[in-house]
Image (cartoon, rainbow, N blue to C red):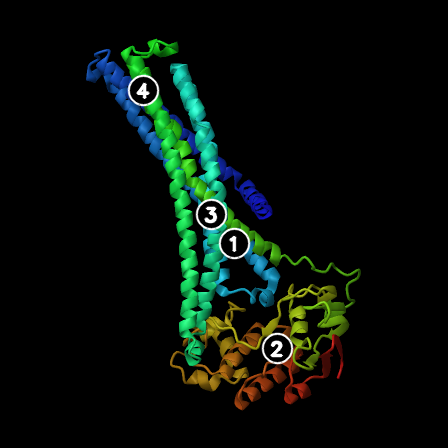
Amino acid sequence: MVEQAVARRWLGGLSAHSRPLILATVSAGVVVGIATIVQMALLAGIVHQGIVEKVPVDELSLLFTGAIAAILIRGVAQGLQARYAARCSRTVRSEVRHQINRCWQASGPVAIGQTSAGTLAREWLDHTDALHGYFARFLPQMMLAVIVPMIILVVVFSLDWLAGVFLLLSAPLIPLFMALVGMGAEKLNQQHFQTIGRLSGQFLDKVRGLTTLQLFGQTAPAAETLRKRSDDYRRITMKTLKIAFLSSAVLEFFSSVAIAVVAIYIGFGLLGYISFGPAGELTLFSGLLILLLAPEFFQPLRLLSQHYHDRAAAMGASAEIVDRLQNGDPAGEPAEPAHQPESPDIIAIRDVSLAYDIARPILDRVSLVINQGDVIALTGPSGGGKSSLLYLLAGFMQPDHGHILVFGDRPGEQTFGWLGQSPFLVHGTWADNLRLTTPGATDIAIETALHHVGLEGLLSSRKRGIYSAITEDGQGLSGGQARRLSLARVFVANYDLILLDEPTAGLDSDSEIYVLEALHKLAQAGKTLVFATHHQALLTLANRTLLVTEGGVRDA
């Protein structure tokens, strides 16, 4: 219940930003309702004039023209209603994706890497798209389900107050049963999104590790796991459909009964079998108009019932999105220190602590100053905190205590170069990959950067040069070549600060030499380098070596 309350507040905040478009959608819907009433009144007038008053058809041209005009106005208003609704939904979904993107950025690649790519894709695509029906259909229809029936009730009461009472008494039954059925739909939809998120994540993991599964003979157990998850998804989907059909059946039953009661009353009243109340004053015009308006009275409620499942789907998706947004909010983000460093060209770490396990902190009250142009090597045992310290400098993580300033700003505020242990490549060309960080880089700058990392020989063997194709898994490149291609981005972008996590780990001897030479060039250019390594050649490149172990950082 707490999760649903938070999700409702979050949806309420989104709707407040889109209120003008929602009101425009409702206004167009009201015009549709009024045009429908006018259309039905003109049709009833045509029948009454033609049958009862025996008016010739040629004298009814004005009524026919009015009915056609009402139909045209109704069609135009429906088009505008759909257009405003789509625009409202698009605006909201764009805002939600911005929120998710900001959340991912705040979480950083370390925290976001703990979540399956399939789950993240579901949040970005399916969870966000599930809000479409809520803002495009449910919210406007919730207002129209009150406004349009009230207008129809005013018209019906003006014609026959007893028929109006019948409609008035039957109207609350539909929302009542709709709400009762919908209570379970919200929870089922949340389970639906959780199940499909787990299924998509597991499926993606199995596809990525298919070769490993085949080598160890584990494809059958993996397939069985996916089968069970798929069956869970099937059961949840069928339960959701069962509730949808149940609510539709309840709605149709009560609306049909109410319309039938009104029809019986009108029929017996016109035949003279009912003399109670205003029945004796019924005419073909008033009776037919009431019969024509009775289905239109329930139509907004019918649509609201159909769109109520959009609300349930949105509530389920919102709970998942809000959970992501709350978990991604860096609650422990440090405040600005009391004073800024005298020079902006200083990296300052002050009294910083970080712990994954409270009993064993990775960093414990660490203070450190790195000057512009320093080449710092972080060394120490595996798990000692070297990578964590780099993540803090990059802004990928937030310290539990203390402050960090990188060139006078919080980590991540200013651009910097990063080279992790796994190179990041995108599907495209060599040029596309190097222009990720510097979109305006010229071909000459790209070729020069590739020369710096020793890839000019490989480049010359490619027919299309820097416009040769490359896949995101680096197909056609060795691990060392892919690492050097990522390192070339640093030369193209000309960063002042470059952070590297084990830049030579897992490389062959040729790639090691090229990477060492590239880093030496960067150091000679006055760049600030901070890298974690165990490699002796890299340690000799540094002008300062820091030992990171047992929660402390000290000069080696």
- Spot occupied by residue 342 in the image (x, y as percentages of width and height): 79, 67
Residue under the point 74% across and 59% down: 336
| Closest to the observer, 479 or 220 | 220
| Closest to the observer, 279 or 35 | 279
Q: Mark 1 points at which residue?
A: 97
- Spot occupied by residue 90 in the image (x, y as percentages of width and height): 46, 47
Q: What element carries label 4?
A: helix
The answer to which of marks 3 and 2 sits earlier in the sequence is 3
Q: Marks 3 and 1, how far apart in space?
A: 17 Å
Image mark for residue 264: 4
Residue type for callout 3: Ala
Classify 10 Å Cα crowding around label 2: few (below 14), some (14-19), many (20 and above): many
Q: Marks 4 and 1, how far apart in space?
A: 53 Å
For discs 4 and 3, the disc positioned in front in the rendered view? 4
Quarter placement of the N terminus: top right
Residue under the point 65% across and 59% down: 330
Classify 10 Å Cα crowding around label 3: few (below 14), some (14-19), many (20 and above): many
Residues at discs 4 and 2 in contact (Cβ within 8 Å):
no
Residue type for callout 1: Arg
Residue type for callout 4: Ile
Q: Is residue 26 left or right of residue 12?
A: left
Q: Is mark 3 on a helix, strand or loop?
A: helix
Residue type for callout 2: Asp
Q: Mark 2 points at which residue?
A: 501
Q: Mark 3 points at which residue?
A: 313
